[in-house]
Amino acid sequence: MATGAKSFVDNPLLGSGRLNRAGLHLGRVRLAHALGRWRRGRLTHAVPPDWREQFDRDGYIAVPGILPLEEFVRLRAALLQLDLECREHQQGETVTLRLPVGPQLLREVPVLAKLLADPSWRAAMAYVAATRSEPLYYLQAVAGGVAEGAPDPQVELHADTFHPSMKAWLFLTNVADEERPLTYVAGSHRLSPQRAAWEQAKSVDVMASDDRLSQRGSLRISPEELEGLGLPQPTRFTVPANTLVIADTCGFHARGDSDQATLRIELWAYCRRTPFLPWTGLDPLSALGLSKRKAELATRAVDWLAARGWMKQHWRPAGPWRERLASYQSSVTAGRSAGARTETARSVPVGVGF
Ligand SMILES: [Fe+2]
């Protein structure tokens, strides 16, 4: 109860219709949001005021041109050339490639080390995440429409979890509207009375639905429901390279769909800490001096558990990052020249342009 556990289906208490009718889920949501607000109130220092204003209003911070152009070009060139071993994971027709950012990578790309240590950058990450716990950083490439499979589940609007948590993207490539842009429902990070009523209703009904991903704690929402919650249609982040987006992913978001093969490359950050903490720091890994190794350690920990049959490792080894990227780049180029795929694409609604 006092952790970030979110799956209704894996925990008989969290999934209990009787307890949720009595307000268990909504009680956890309310307490987690109240503590998140309290922690954020103590993390405002060094966050540029216009960024903070944007986040409080919209649930995300979007900063085009985060780096001086010459520095960004150097950063991108260095990141795309790395030979370190990466992993990949297929969801439907989309393959995601990830390379954890660790001490070796930071030594090879000092311009990245400098960026991740920048006080405004760190303050903004901490503010959105509502914790000073160091985010996990990865290089990430999303190759969409390159594999055979069911529709990508990420194209459905959803909240990742029930409490404030952070994901960030520094786009290394331009993202056009047909290139599976990130989409986000502005203002959906707030626990409004309508959202609270929706959470309560969902928590009671979810186990009777056939929506497996909602049952696992990432509640899906249909675009038609947004208006009833006083929310707009999603903003689509069709942005130039060198744009940073930091979002609270308890707000509704998705990946835009496309009928083309596409490749998006980004520096990606993730931070989700146990939500019921009144303090903003006291992160054990940071105290042990391991904060720069977090992403690598997370991968190894899952490998260790998977080797003992206690967990499934979804991320399979995919060889050197540069080579794998090049192979997806050529699949995308080949896919595009072969024309649009024939199957019907499912689409998220066209929202406000960014
Ligand atoms: Fe998500």
Image (cartoon, grey):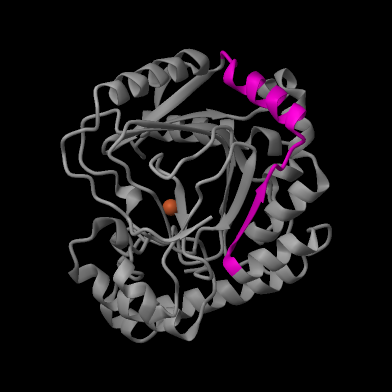
Residue 82 among those drawn in magenta? yes
The residue drawn where x is 36% and y is 87% is: 22
Q: Classify residue 307 by image quadrant.
A: top left
* Residue 269 pos. (x, y %): 59, 43
Say which of 281 and 199 sits in front.
199
Q: Is residue 103 visible?
A: no
Q: Classify residue 165 by image quadrant.
A: bottom right
The residue drawn where x is 43% and y is 83% is: 194
The residue drawn where x is 38% and y is 32% is: 262
Q: Would you place residue 46 above or below residue 97 in this image?
A: below
* Residue 226 pos. (x, y %): 37, 73
Left or right side of 221 for 231? right
- Quadrant the C terminus occupies: bottom right
Q: Is residue 172 visible?
A: yes
Residue stretch in magenta: 58-83
Q: Would you place residue 248 above or below residue 41 in this image?
A: above
Left or right side of 283 for 312? left
Q: Would you place residue 326 above or below residue 243 in this image?
A: above
